[in-house]
Image: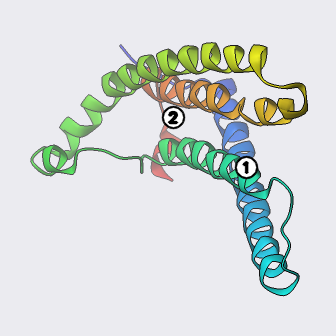
Amino acid sequence: MFRIEPYWITSLRHALVRMDTFMAGLSLLLLLALVFGQVLMRNLLNSSIPHADILARYLVLYVTFFGAALAIESHRHIRIDVVAACMRPESIRLMRPPLYLISAVVCAVMSWAAMRFWYDDWQYVAEHERWTSILALITPFGFSLLTLHFLLGGLFVLSEADRQT
């Protein structure tokens, strides 16, 4: 039913992991610098960085979505440990692909809903606040990214070389 992963899929997954790692790290670094700068400015200069709280909220979403994609690839995402503790490792491995496909469907529906919500926001947001709508694209993009990771994990079994690492 599930095939060994072709080389181009493996290359795609490795490229996605590199992009996810870079974006999660960069987002976290920017978030830390922004919050640290905000704290310093408020305490030392009695001022603040304009719109820093809005930007920090979106950076948290960036870190969350890219980190979640990395968690999926390393099989460290949230799962029901009570059920997994009662199952044999072979059973868990057999259950993973169908559960990943179900998760891909759920994330695809969430991506579609997030895109509709974003488009509605884009149409009615004030012109001077359009930059927040652009940052808000992380929600449909993030769910689409999670859909892709779950779909690849559900359709393909890792090659023998990747399975051993």
**What mark, if any, has residue 132 been given in the picture?**
none
Residue at 39% from the left image edge and 27% from the top image edge: 100
Specify the amino acid type for callout 2. Answer: Ser
Distance, label 1 to label 2, CA atoms, is 43 Å
Q: Quadrant of the N terminus?
A: top left
Number of numbered discs? 2
Q: Which residue in the structure is indicated by mark 2?
A: 159
Mark 2 residue element: loop
Where is residue 123 shown, x and y percent of the image?
A: 77, 13
Residue at 75% from the left image edge and 17% from the top image edge: 124
Specify the amino acid type for callout 1. Answer: Ile
Figure check: 65 above or below 165: above
Where is residue 165 shown, x and y percent of the image?
A: 51, 53
Figure check: 152 above or below 54: above
Residue at 54% from the left image edge and 16% from the top image edge: 113
* Residue count near mark 2 (Cα–Cα under 10 Å), binned few <14, some 14–19, many ≥20: some
**What mark, if any, has residue 54 been given in the picture?**
1
Q: Nearer the viewer, residue 11 or 48?
A: 48
Figure check: 134 above or below 64: above
The nearer-to-camera label among 1 and 2 is 1
The image quadrant that residue 132 belongs to is: top right
Where is residue 81 shown, x and y percent of the image?
A: 21, 50
Q: Nearer the viewer, residue 136 or 14?
A: 136
Mark 1 residue element: helix
